Amino acid sequence: METFPVIDMEKLNGGERGATMDLIKDACENWGFFELVNHGISHDLMDTVEKLTKDHYRKCMEKRFKEMVESRGLDAAHSEINDMDWESTFFLRHLPVSNISEIPDLDEDYRKAMKEFVVDLEKLAEQLLDLLCENLGLEKGYLKNAFYGSKGPTFGTKVSNYPPCPKPELIKGLRAHTDAGGIILLFQDDKVSGLQLLKDGKWVDVPPMRHSIVINIGDQLEVITNGKYKSVLHRVIAQPDGNRMSIASFYNPGSNAVIYPAPTLVEKEAEKSQVYPKFVFEDYMKLYAGVKFLAKEPRFEAMKAVESTVNLASIATV
């Protein structure tokens, strides 16, 4: 059994850099996921964010979640439920413009800790994109620029709790999907597991690990790398006990960024017949919203159809 890839970022600074870069390359090519340790984000800050997230759920979200479960009769379900997820969530936007100050019910210390945390995550995302560039033979900054559009990247966080579920065999915490965006940075519960990815036709657990950040590849990186790196199906299994915390931050292209395979990667892979589409990120997201839990390939095909009717060549791809 292959072990889930764990990358020690401290090793990028010494004699083990080459081997560590190879591990990242293998993880991107064969897993679509990896876990980072020694990533430079303060453990104290992570502990604070975790504590305040769990406090916030208990104070502001738990009652609402229980009422929703009751009103929909989920606790009494007898057959599989395929149209919803056993999760309690809220969303924060950081870039291009933050909405943290507008979210109701957040304590001031929670807002402050979250703001500090996402600044660190943004730096980490950009550092990772450059490591990916290095492995792909793209010039430094290529991926960040590809995401930039006219206003910079879109960066947001989905804060989720997966409460104990009385019927985990009938409902998923989160149904299987690939992520539409760019690169995803997840701070997950280190005690309660549940996240799984599909590898070689089998569901594999993403192991909870204290103070780690789990990284996964979104659909946009699959397109830009011309399929060299793939976004991977993943899901959350509901658990009968324990409340699992998940803070997933999505570093995505700007809404008007034009996404297309990096020309040097298309040339290198010329013998491959599959060419990914060229599209405006916002158009992809509009399509994804309705088909998130379906296969990604028809999304790419649909964007190709749009591409053939709209002349994207006239859009600046700077």
Image: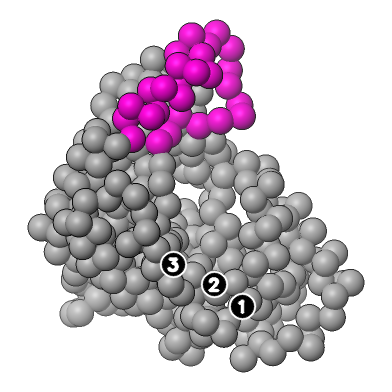
Q: Residues within 10 Å of mark 2 (few under 14, many from 20)?
A: many
Q: Nearer the viewer, residue 200 or 57?
A: 57
> What x and y, as percent, mark residue 40?
19, 69
Magenta includes 66?
yes
The residue labelled by disc 1 is 257
Outermost residue to the right: 309
Query: Circle 1 — which element?
Result: loop
Magenta-drawn segment: 61-88
Q: Amino acid at mark 3?
A: Phe
> Residue at the spot x=28%, y=71% of the render?
119
Query: Circle 2 — which element?
Result: loop
Q: Amino acid at mark 2?
A: Pro
The residue labelled by disc 3 is 155
The quarter of the rendered structure image containing the C terminus is: bottom right
Q: Nearer the viewer, residue 108 or 27?
A: 108
Q: Quadrant of residue 60?
A: top left
Point out which mark residue 253 bears.
2
> What x and y, as percent, mark residue 111?
25, 58
Magenta includes 136?
no
Residues tagged 2 and 1 counted as in contact (Cβ below 8 A): yes
Residue 170 visible in the current orientation: no
Q: Using the image, determine if residue 28 lies above or below residue 186.
A: below
Q: Amino acid at mark 1?
A: Ala
Q: Residues within 10 Å of mark 1 (few under 14, many from 20)?
A: many
Q: Is residue 46 left or right of residue 81?
A: left
Q: Quadrant of residue 253?
A: bottom right
> Residue at the spot x=62%, y=85% of the render?
264
Question: How far apart are the alpha carbons under marks 2 and 3?
Answer: 8 Å
> What x and y, as percent, mark residue 187?
29, 52
